[in-house]
Amino acid sequence: MFECRTLRFVPTSTLFGGVLMAALRAVGKDEKAPERKLYTILEAAEADDLLEELRSMRRRIAVTLDDSSTPARDLAALSRRQIELGRDIAAILARESQEAGRGADVTDEAFDAEAI
């Protein structure tokens, strides 16, 4: 959920030109943002959703890093991979944000409350 002073927005998905883009809509005062489904690595791979696959792998590595029974010899490699996954996720989100911002320029019109 995104907040902007007193306005709250919940992202929804819109397919535009073959690209899945996040769209924002205003929510009601008591409405909660929907919970994001956590996919397993296999579910994300089968859905061909790279972003969710990376998120699932990052969660799996985080669980392993927090496990006290994880051998010390594995911690460095797991930590490096955790950082790489975070960077990959950030790069995908930044690219999607840039692609979403390439819309047409539209001029604002006067608001007409009667039209509602």
Image (cartoon, rainbow, N blue to C red):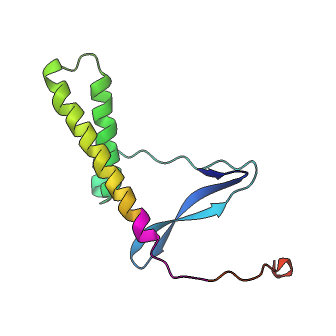
Q: Residue furthest right?
A: 114
Q: Residue at x 43, y 63 (%)?
A: 97
The image shows a total of numbered marks equal to: 0
Which residue occupies the foreground of this view, 44 or 89?
A: 89
Quadrant housing residue 46? bottom left
Looking at the figure, which quarter contains the C terminus?
bottom right
Question: Quick check: 4 left or right of 87?
Answer: right
Location of residue 3 with respect to 81 vertically, above or below = below
Q: Quadrant of residue 47?
A: bottom left
Residue 38 position by quadrant: top left
Q: Nearer the viewer, residue 80 or 54?
A: 80
Name, please, the residue furthest toward the top: 68
Quick check: 103 above or below 54?
below
Q: What residue is drawn where x is 74% and y is 55%? A: 28
Indicate the position of residue 22 as horizontal and vertical percent values.
Answer: 50, 64
Q: Is residue 104 visible?
A: yes
Q: Is residue 99 magenta?
A: yes
Q: Residue at x 59, y 63 (%)?
A: 24
| Residue bounds of the magenta highlight | 97-106
Position above or below: 102 against 42: below
Residue 43 in sight in this render: no
Residue 27 shown left or right of residue 2 in the figure: right
From the image, give the main secondary structure of the stretch colored magenta.
loop
Asked whether 96 or 69 is in front, the reply is 96
Query: Residue 18, position in %: x, y?
Result: 39, 76
Looking at the picture, how far across and down is residue 102, in whole percent? 44, 75
Find residue 78 and report its horizontal and vertical position in percent: 21, 32
Above-or-below relation of 105 to 53: below
The structure residue drawn at horizontal position 18% and vertical position 28%, both measured from the top left corner, is: 76
Residue 101 within the segment the image draws in magenta: yes
